[in-house]
Amino acid sequence: MYELYKTPKGTTYQCDVTNRIVLDFAGQISAFRYSDFVAFRRRVEHVNLHEMIFNLGDEFDVEVIEAPKADRTFVLTLCDLVQLRELLSGTQFTLNLNSMLHETLYSYA
């Protein structure tokens, strides 16, 4: 497994054997196919942080997000959501950069 991106709260890895992205966040480990990773990232990105910050209702204290095809449910506070977004965005950037470098290097070979 290769480390893709790391923050103080979590790390993502790429496993070439299983062709999955492994997310280690807050002690929970989940493995995603690339399409499931993108779907999970979209779910996390669509959470309205502004509403969580300014709404005083108890139902806005946490957000429950299910990981697609991973049988894992994340119960996230506002801080957890911000940290998870950072980890997922950094991972997506790394994957995009690796893809661009691969295309560039191997198109001239």
Image: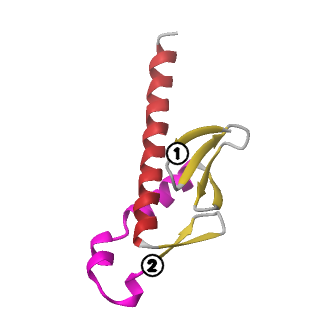
Q: Nearer the viewer, residue 5 or 71?
A: 5
User: What residue is at 41 percent from the left and 67 percent from the top?
Assistant: 79
Would you say 78 lies left or right of 3 here? left
Which residue is at 65% across, 63% downward?
A: 70
> Neighbour class for label 2 at 10 Å: few (<14), some, many (≥20)?
some
Residue type at tag 2 = Val
Please tell me in which quadrant of the rendered image residue 42 appears: bottom left
Tell me, yes or no, whether the highlighted magenta stretch contains residue 97.
no
- Residue ID at (39%, 62%): 82
Magenta-highlighted residues? 34-62
Circles 1 and 2: CB distance less than 8 Å?
no
- Give the position of the N terminus as an image quadrant: top right
Q: Is residue 63 above or below residue 39?
A: below
Mark found first going from the N terminus, 1 or 2: 1
Image quarter of residue 14 = top right
Mark 1, residue position: 6
Q: Colour scheme used in the picture? A: secondary structure
Name above or below for residue 13 compared with residue 100: below
Q: In screen coordinates, is 92 left or right of 10? A: left
Residue 96 in the image: above or below residue 37:
above
Residue that badge 2 annotates: 62
